[in-house]
Image (spheres, rainbow, N blue to C red):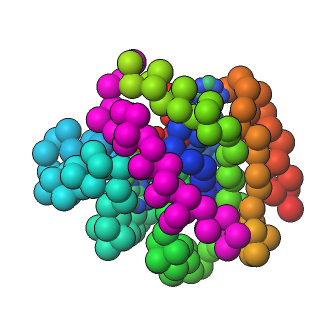
Amino acid sequence: MRLIMMGPPGAGKGTQAKFVAEHFGIPAISTGDIFRANVSQGTPLGVKAQGYMDAGEYVPDEVTNLMVRNRIDEDDAAPGFLLDGYPRTLAQVEELDGMIKFTGHSLDAVVVLTVDAEEIVQRLLQRAEVEGRADDTEDVIRRRQEIYTEQTEPLIDVYRGRGLLIEVDGMGEVADVTERIFAALDTVAQS
Ligand code: AP5
Ligand code: MG
């Protein structure tokens, strides 16, 4: 299975990606998590990414694309993968198309989690108290939402046009959302 998990900041991508990836026996690849690990280790990639992340801006495509290309090349991603937070721009969509085509496979589905704007802010402010992520302040959350609307929301129509889009209601209990995703994806896995 080659899957994408999309949705606005705080929609629950990372939370659900873990369960879905485990279900299908594939790695969950979160670009945000890889960037944060590099920032905390002070690697050259982390140094490049940090300023953008702290401001809620996207890291430049060429940096992100190369990082994903290298990650997808690893052995554990040969049977498939779930991408959380990539692609986020039209240029990244094209780049990913090339990477997958090169392996002779194709994308199976794009899951989009839909969650009310108010609920999202509540979830992120709550997470800020627990995890203290640098980009979970009210101003930066707002900027992340804006940039999602401008740059990433248009991807929904692209994948809908390809017949790959699965929209899932991301409101309510975590386990209920997981069940909805499994129900939608199991039909894809059987087809
Ligand atoms: P990234 O780390 O991907 O951040 P994001 O998209 O803003 O999304 P989050 O991780 O904040 O939210 P999520 O949807 O994963 O929700 P979660 O499960 O955590 O990216 C960070 C930055 O990296 C970007 O801003 C950018 O700078 C850079 N970057 C990353 N990818 C890039 C790319 N492709 N191109 C360029 N730059 C890139 O849930 C949120 C909270 O809600 C958690 O506390 C969770 O416990 C809770 N929660 C989850 N589900 C529920 C539920 N059903 N009910 C109640 N609470 C819930
Ligand atoms: Mg996340």
Q: Is residue 25 visible?
A: no
Q: Is residue 110 visible?
A: yes
Q: Please, what is the dominant secondary structure of the magenta stretch? A: helix
Left or right, 54 with respect to 24, comes to left
Left or right, 142 with respect to 111, comes to left
Residue 6 is a magenta residue: no
Residue at 20 percent across and 39 percent down: it is 40
Residue 114 x %, y %? 70, 45
Residue 146 is a magenta residue: yes
Number of dots carrying numbers: 0
Residue 110 x %, y %? 68, 59
Residue at 56 percent across and 58 percent down: it is 149
Q: Can you say whether 51 is above or below 95 in the image?
A: above
Residue lying at the far top in this picture: please name it: 130
Residue at 68 percent across and 52 percent down: it is 112
Q: Quadrant of residue 164?
A: bottom right
Residue bounds of the magenta highlight: 130-159
Query: Which quadrant of the figure contains the C terminus?
Result: bottom right
Query: Which quadrant of the figure contains the N terminus?
Result: bottom right
Q: Quadrant of residue 128?
A: top left
Q: Can you say whether 52 is above or below 116 in the image?
A: below
Residue 59 x %, y %? 32, 61
Q: Can you say whether 180 is above or below 107 in the image?
A: above
Residue at 35 percent across and 56 percent down: it is 57
